[in-house]
Image: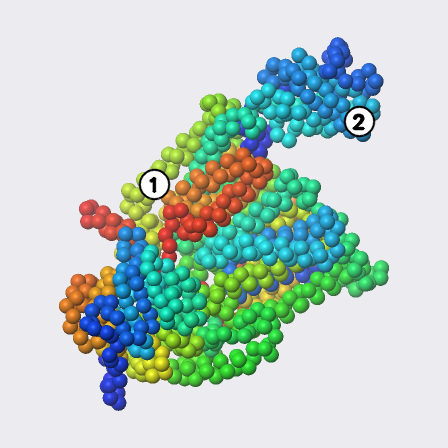
Amino acid sequence: MHTVERSHDRKLRAIVVFFAFLLTLLSMSSLPAASADDVGTDEYEFVFSGNVQFDREPLENVRLTVEGNGYEAEVETDAEGRWRVGVPEKDTYTITLDEDTLPEGVIVVEGQASVDAEFGLTSTKAVNFFLGEGVRETTSYLDTVIDRVFNGLNFGLLLALASIGLSLIFGTTGLSNFAHAEMVTFGALMAFTFGVVLAVPLWLALPVAVVATAAFGYFNDALLWKPLRRRGVGLIPMMIVSIGLSLAVRYLYQVFYGGSTSQLPGVGMAEMQFGPVSLSWVDIGSMIGSTLILLGVAYFLLRTRIGKATRAVSDNPGLASASGIDVDRVIRIVWTLGGALAGLSGILWAYFRPGVSWDMGFQILLLIFAAVVLGGLGTAFGALVGSVIVGLLVELSTLFLPSDMKYVGALGVMILILLFRPQGILGRRERIG
Amino acid sequence: MIDWGQLFSNAAVELISPTTAAYALAALGLAVHFGFTGLLNFGQAGFMALGAYGYAISTLTFNFPVWASVLVGIGASVVFALILGVPTLRLRADYLAIVTIAAAEILRLIFTTNTYIDVTGSANGLSGYKGGFAALNPLPEGTYGFAPFTNNSYDTWLRIVAWTIVILACLFVWLLMRSPWGRVVKGIREDEDAVRALGKNVFSYKMQSLIIGGVLGTVAGMIFILPRAVVPSNYQTTLTFFIYTILLLGGAATILGPVIGSIIFWVLLSFISGFIARAVEVGWLPFLSNVQAGQLRFVIVGVVLMLIVIYRPQGIFGNKKELAFVK
Amino acid sequence: MSNSPAPRRGAPVKTTGLHIGEAEPGVAKVDPIVVLDGVKRTFGGLTAVDVEHLEIPRNAITALIGPNGAGKTTLFNLLTGFDKPNAGTWSFDGQTLAGVPSFKVAKMGQVRTFQLTKALALLSVLDNMKLGGKDQKGENLFRALVPSSWRDQDRALEEKAIELLARFKLDGKKDDYAASLSGGQRKLLEMARALMSDPALVMLDEPMAGVNPALTQSLLDHILDLKTQGMTVLFVEHDMQMVRHIADWVVVMAEGRVVAEGAPREVMQNQAVIDAYLGSHHDTDLGEDPTRVDTIKELLHDDDRT
Ligand SMILES: Nc1ncnc2c1ncn2[C@@H]1O[C@H](COP(=O)(O)OP(=O)(O)OP(=O)(O)O)[C@@H](O)[C@H]1O
Ligand SMILES: [Mg+2]
């Protein structure tokens, strides 16, 4: 099984991380002592040491502080980037690298400018800092923005695949389908089942997964929703049924696939630099693929007979059926198409996160809903616009917010937009009376 | 062999557990929202989280006494209701759903982020706030009750307080719903434009209802954390869905429905998970591991939710007469 | 629409001398209760309402007629604060109403019914009626908790409701859910409910549509009764017989504009009115906004080609 550990944190991806330092304890002990780069090593027998480098170049005059147990010392690196600090006790100290003393364009990987260091069995301890290219407010802010925009577009396009299906289903049946996320997960799980468990080649496994999800959508309608429509179950009860379905199916996934995260083949492929933007082939393929599929969907809705019928049903089911459109057939096609799109979205989401897990769809369910609501409930093109906005918001909000709050920005902005344009961006207002 | 006696007594414990009381209260709040006013609040988990964190943070960070911590929680939830309500109560029902669900998630993410770890404890949550409540306990040390309902002094005190609050809340909602205020609110559930045309300030009534139900959820959140710790992952959307399951089980537009719904939910859930676990142990379900079996109960909750909505939409206590018209 | 009211004990007393000068669109009234100026409402490219000037006479029965889609319901929505115009001002009883929310409009005594009936389905008929009551103490959250503070008022309200229900032949149904009423009965219930607040102006959107002819007569009597009680009635109706029978004044709308005004008998002869009716498809109401029909047309167009 091809698994590559990659951080879930997309923010880190934007930063190209280099190893700044690789020194063994043995080589440390043979270093000559210097003045400002060598503090307290004569008084104390316990020594922290390190070598600050970026891109294999040593960085001089970088300031570090060592603090703990009431002791504090400051040190600057020498021309080779080296530093040594002696401390009184064999205990834990906090070592902080002062980012302001780094050259322009170089930063410490987020959250690691300060490390807690502890001695092992020996009386010396090497302390590494991971440096990377990136923004520190003043440096290449624009480049980061551009990079985030690309990530946001990529994310937005994959969201769009899922939200267009949700929107079409809402438009044609009035159902707010909370179980849509489970179709997204289903696509990724099928890709995993075929591509990894059964080791089918990827070019075959992915289409098979999409077809399987399309079938899942079809049976969703045929076995559950159509009978419920026949019974005349109201829209809100139907929505709650979809919540029940979502719970049941999601935990069923966990029963079958377990609670862990696995990877699809090709995850963690090398990234290429295009100016400020770093993308892997998977990213490029994902963006091109989703754009092509979305164009296909647009063609389907605008030009084909059945696509027009779909829009007609969305606009006004009663009138459409009075004009001789087979509404049930349209709805079945919408469910199947919605399933296929959700499945593809799930596969792309598995590459984007990266990872396949039982609740991966549920994690973005709210963003999908946000996209649909933003665009205007029930309008397919609105969902597309909404998704791209949500995708961009999520990625760009990391410029201002900690990355574990990036969804907060997107959801907050959705609430704000609803304040000013309740019918969504492309939606229409209802009539009264 | 399966020890049925043990299974039944474990399940029976849930009959009066504080968790059951907390869910009953949260579901009662949702009944005010959804059952009586027709507000699709999908953020009840957020209101509960505000109660939990409001109480715990006031106690731990600010050293507030119990009554002040409770007030902080309630105040926070009133503010939350206002923030949610002002933009959305004028919009269509499904917008309230999406906004409340999003707002509850925003709260949870804020409580989970590392940024405020000093106050919220981040993903690990908070504990050590029970002292104040325990100090109010008038019961001397010792064991109370009879098997299977035996508890120590703290747990007994907690059960007494929790269920007293539930009973008072039921009384409160009952009084409200049989008054002209309740009539207006039920009218809004049926058709808010019609009620508006009769000269009622629909927005204000919806807001009052949102606040009342939200505060009930917030108090439920406080009861919920008194037997355990505050953990942010407890306040996921799934919590709201469980509360909907309870509400619909009992009957959405009823007073006792949420209480009975919660009791049934927890007793059954405890019994089913106990049963599945034992069944796996004795080899009745050879294709399942113990961990898998643990997840199966959520599958069952989901299926039960679907079945009630489809086959008994008025719930156990709902009015049969309504059934003909439920849309 | 052929339920001609059987002649009753003499024709109803018409109020005359309502206007000042020539009876033309926008003519001034002796004692107007509602005055509109430059009220305009567009939906996308479609101008639904565009009224330069209009006055509704007080203590009279005014009929608002016009072909389907003329903008009558939209005008009702604007007047009652359910919709906001693109431009224009209007006043009720001397108070400007622009920007006043619908519930306040109702509180001021201008109560309406809806073309698509809005019975509160899962409330009993009696509760539906009581909801119409004005200034109820128990509708305050805190007083609601003290039943003794509102019980007396509620009882009085109940008596009034039962009296009204009896007049609308609904008293037998008072404890049933409104959902169990027939379509016509719901119309009646809605009208009765609107009267619970003793309004100064009652606005009825097609009150007779779907009501059994036998009942129409008593309803008409009731509307006439409202006038004798000092109320003003503005109603939308397609049934010309009825309009002729009870209206004191008729306002004709077409394509959003007021094309004619006058006493019932004269206005029917007006060329503009005849044009308005003949120029439109009177009976092809799909009940839907035509802009949404586009995709269907497009589809049908496809069929033609293939
Ligand atoms: N919310 C809306 N969005 C778009 N168009 C609307 C809306 N409401 C009304 N319209 C359009 O405005 C025009 C006037 O509609 P209105 O309902 O006022 O007609 P009406 O005179 O009441 O007709 P009827 O006699 O059939 O009830 C119609 O063409 C209608 O399609
Ligand atoms: Mg109309």
Where residue B302 appears, as percent x and y from the top left, is 56, 54
Where residue B104 appears, as percent x and y from the top left, is 57, 50
Task: Indicate the amino acid at tag 2.
Answer: Tyr
Chain designation of label 1:
A
Residue occupying image coordinates x 19% and y 62%:
C280
Reply above or below: B11 against C29.
Answer: above
| Residue in front for this viewpoint, A258 or A291 | A291
Q: Classify mark 1: residues with Cα within 10 Å, few (<14), some (14-19) or many (20+).
A: some
Callouts 2 and 1 close, C-beta under 8 Å: no
Which of labels 2 and 1 is toward the front? 2
Q: Earlier in the sequence, mark 2 or mark 1?
A: 2
Q: How many marks?
A: 2
| Colour style of the rendered protein structure | rainbow
Where residue B7 appears, as percent x and y from the top left, is 71, 57
Q: Please identify the quarter of the rendering in which residue C163 is found.
A: bottom left
Residue occupying image coordinates x 35% and y 54%:
A328
The label on residue C197 is: none
The label on residue A298 is: 1
Reply above or below: A332 against C37.
Answer: above
Q: Classify mark 2: residues with Cα within 10 Å, few (<14), some (14-19) or many (20+).
A: few
The secondary element bearing badge 1 is classed as helix
Task: Indicate the amino acid at tag 1.
Answer: Ala
Where residue C58 appears, as percent x and y from the top left, is 32, 76
